[in-house]
Image (cartoon, grey):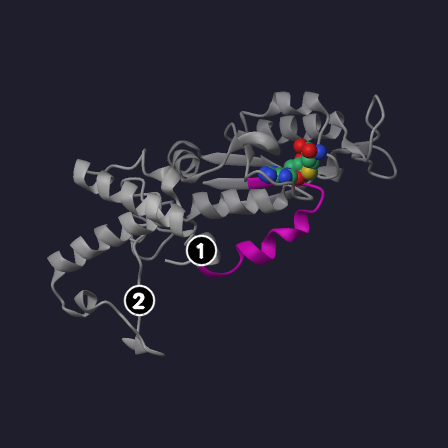
Amino acid sequence: MICETLSVFPEVFEPYLGVSVLGRARRAGVFEFEAHDLRDWTHDRHRTVDDAPFGGGQGMLMKPEPIFEAVEDLASRGPRPHVVFFSPCGRRFDQRVAERLARDEQRLLLVCGRYEGMDERAYGLADEVLSLGDYVLTGGELAALVVIDAVCRLLPGALGDEMSAVDESFSTAGLLEYAQYTRPASFRGMDVPEVLLSGDHARVAAWRRESAIERTATWRPDLIDGAELTGEERERARQIASRSREGETHGRA
Ligand code: SAH
């Protein structure tokens, strides 16, 4: 996988993508990363990328010309990129989208906005427009980092243990991940559930399934309808969800 960003702050990516799992994966050749500076496709002395909006209003908008030139130029080098733009108006990025991008794309070109966003015509270059969620960031760079992180950790060889992406939140059956514990078994009067110390794999598996259902029903009851559950499990999940709504126990399980 080749990930490229196009942005006016190309220097912000490297510190994050150089460390830990992603840093190792890059050094191992699991994915390549290159940050492009949008200003390299401007032609004036001030390397201008923004201008005032027609019709008035606050702030500045990114001009279409450098974005078109940059995306066309980059697309002409190497395999055709999948071009992603970012906007709060885009489709919500989630684990399903991350899985699709990791599976289907060889080259991602992530185009990051700044200021009040972009001239509407620039979005014509996008294969898709993604949003991180219903809030407004100052720029698309964080969104690009989020997408690169979520996608590249799914690539074969990125996580040391090939299984570690399998059990996670959203992956199995549309449930959140089960509760996990490490040593010490007893900490400030809080004990790890006895079953996890038992070494009985079948009981541990049953406990984890139960824990995943309980956490999903408590924290994200909106996921229950789409989760793969037996009739009995679904009924229990609904009961937990309605109890937790009554008790307003959000935030702690
Ligand atoms: N005026 C725009 C927001 C512009 S924010 C509006 O109200 O819709 C500037 C840039 O930050 C955007 O072009 C986009 O690239 C990025 N950005 C802001 N919020 C985002 C979000 N929720 N998800 C993804 N990118 C976002």
Q: Position of residue 170 (x, y in %)?
A: 35, 43
Quadrant containing ligand 1: top right
Residue depicted at x 86% and y 34%: 44
Badge 2 amino acid:
Tyr
Q: Position of residue 100 (x, y in %)?
A: 40, 33
Q: Which residue is mark 1?
A: 251
Badge 1 amino acid:
Gly
Q: How many marks?
A: 2
Badge 1: few (under 14), some or many (20 or more) residues near its Cα, within 10 Å?
A: few
Question: In the image, which residues are magenta?
Answer: 4-20
Q: Position of residue 137 (x, y in %)?
A: 65, 43
Residue 197 against residue 205 in the figure, above or below = below
Q: Is residue 48 left or right of residue 193?
A: right
Residue depicted at x 13% and y 58%: 203
Q: Is residue 244 magenta?
A: no
Q: Closer to the observer: label 1 or label 2?
A: 1
Residue 64 against residue 145 in the figure, above or below = above
Q: Which residue is mark 2?
A: 181
Q: Is residue 203 left or right of residue 33?
A: left
Where residue 59 sits, quadrant-wise, is: top right
Label 1 secondary element:
loop
Q: CA distance from mark 1 to mark 2?
A: 18 Å
